[in-house]
């Protein structure tokens, strides 16, 4: 990913936190005759010196067959993003030399993707994925809430896949390189641009502290 230095985020804790917050990725794998792309929820697992991203694919999806032996792939986590109008910049009234842009947060996880044919691993993955996404609910649903025979039937229709992460890279393109008054204008504009805009305004404020 092309990342100008002033937008680059290299801190592992920040990148991992963003992945855990976004939790949904575009999984991309090049093959001999095409590029496989699947949009999937993923769960981050951290071990002793290892970082993995787990997901599962429909058994009917050819993507998992392409990674049986392990293939270099990337998981793209797209965080909040928003349009920025030039009218938000005070400098527009000074000289008019402003144009629109888009601000966003994105994390790419590069590594080796491989199918995992292990019932115990798949169940552990499903439990972890469910826990991560149900944690904020007043009465979190658990896999064990469904009949075991039903879970078994549903599980036979999916294949576990694991990305062993080798590199994380992040782009926090938030207008932090703009003059102070235009940064302030960006924050004001984003604060009025819905949930994604407010998230980006908060992220920009954090970059300026």
Image (cartoon, rainbow, N blue to C red):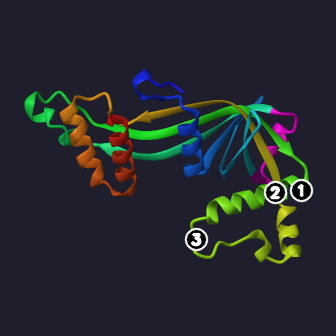
Residue at far left of view: 94
Q: Which mark is residue 137?
A: 3
The residues tagged by marks 2 and 3 sit, at their Cα atoms, a distance apart of 20 Å
Q: Residues within 10 Å of mark 2 (few under 14, many from 20)?
A: few
Q: Which residue is mark 2?
A: 124
The residues colored magenta run 56-70
Q: Residue at x 46, y 40 (%)?
A: 105
Image quadrant where residue 109 sits: top right
Q: Is residue 116 left or right of residue 90?
A: right
**How many residues crowd mark 1 within 10 Å: few (<14), some (14–19), many (20+)?**
few
Residue ID for mark 1: 120
Is residue 134 within the magenta segment?
no
Q: Is residue 157 left or right of residue 39?
A: right
User: Which quarter of the rendering shows the C terminus?
Assistant: top left
Residue 140, visible in the rendered structure: yes
Q: Please tell me the numbered disc located at residue 8.
A: none
Quarter of the view holding residue 136: bottom right
Residue at 36% x, 47% y is 202
Are dots 2 and 1 in contact, CB under 8 Å? yes
- For the residue pair 102 and 162, the one nearer the viewer reads as 162
Spot occupied by residue 148 in the image (x, y as percentages of width and height): 87, 74
Image check: 181 left or right of 172?
left
On screen, 138 above or below 159?
Answer: below
């Amino acid at each position: 990913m092309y990342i100008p230095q002033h937008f680059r985020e290299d801190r592992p804790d920040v990148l991992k936190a963003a992945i855990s917050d976004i939790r949904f990725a575009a999984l991309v794998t090049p093959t001999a005759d095409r590029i496989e792309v699947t949009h999937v929820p993923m769960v981050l697992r951290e071990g002793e010196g290892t970082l993995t991203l787990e997901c599962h694919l429909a058994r009917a999806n050819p993507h998992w067959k392409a990674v049986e032996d392990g293939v270099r792939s990337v998981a793209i986590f797209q965080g909040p993003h928003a349009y920025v109008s030039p009218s938000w910049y005070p400098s527009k009234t000074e000289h008019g030399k402003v144009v629109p842009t888009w601000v966003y947060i994105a994390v790419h996880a590069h590594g080796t993707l491989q199918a995992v044919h292990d019932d115990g691993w798949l169940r552990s993955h499903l439990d972890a994925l469910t826990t991560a996404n149900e944690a904020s609910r007043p009465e979190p649903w658990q896999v064990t809430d469904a009949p075991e025979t039903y879970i078994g039937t549903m599980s036979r229709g999916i294949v576990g896949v694991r990305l062993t992460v080798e590199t994380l890279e992040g782009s926090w393109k938030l207008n932090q390189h703009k003059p102070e008054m235009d940064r302030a204008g960006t924050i004001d504009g984003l604060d009025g641009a819905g949930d994604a805009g407010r998230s980006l305004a908060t992220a920009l404020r954090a970059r300026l502290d």
